[in-house]
Image (cartoon, grey):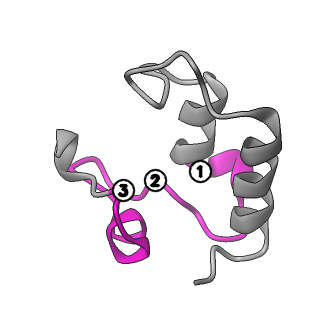
């Protein structure tokens, strides 16, 4: 995986990658995952987009992080 980040499990996402955490539970504004899904950081996720993650699904990711990124 690029930069050691595994996106195929919750454990992998929460472990982060080579450069550290990508999700900060309770803090969507500090979570790199959300910034990349929104296109605020490059490269945007998914790297093979467009299509990008829908606004509805992006809102779900944001809420999940805000609510503590629980399983």
Residue 36, above or below 19: above
Which residue in the protein does label 3 denote?
7
Tags 1 and 2 touching, CB below 8 Å = yes
Residue at disc 3, secondary structure = loop
Q: Which residues are magenta?
A: 7-31
Farthest front residue in view: 51
Q: Position of residue 18 (x, y in %)?
A: 21, 50
Instruction: State the separation of the CA atoms marked 1 and 3.
Output: 14 Å
Which residue lies at the image location 61% right of the left edge and 22% below the top edge? 39
Of label 1 and label 3, which has the lower sequence position? 3
* Residue at the spot of label 2: 22
Would you say 34 lies left or right of 1 here?
A: right
Quarter placement of the C terminus: bottom right
Examine the rendered structure and indicate whether residue 19 appears above or below residue 67: above
Magenta: main secondary structure = loop
In the displayed structure, 71 sits above or below 56; it is below
Badge 1 density bin: few <14, some 14–19, many ≥20, Cα 10 Å: some
Q: Which residue is mark 1?
A: 31
Query: Reading the chain from its start, which is encountered first: label 2 or label 3?
Result: 3
Of circles 2 and 3, the one toward us is 3
Tell whether label 3 touches label 1 (CB within 8 Å).
no
């Amino acid at each position: 995986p690029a930069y050691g980040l595994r996106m195929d499990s919750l454990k992998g996402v929460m472990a982060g990658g080579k450069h550290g955490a990508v999700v900060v539970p309770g803090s969507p504004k500090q979570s790199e995952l959300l910034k990349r899904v929104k296109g605020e950081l490059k490269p945007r996720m998914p790297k093979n987009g467009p299509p990008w993650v829908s606004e509805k699904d992006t809102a779900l990711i944001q809420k999940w992080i805000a609510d503590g990124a629980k399983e």
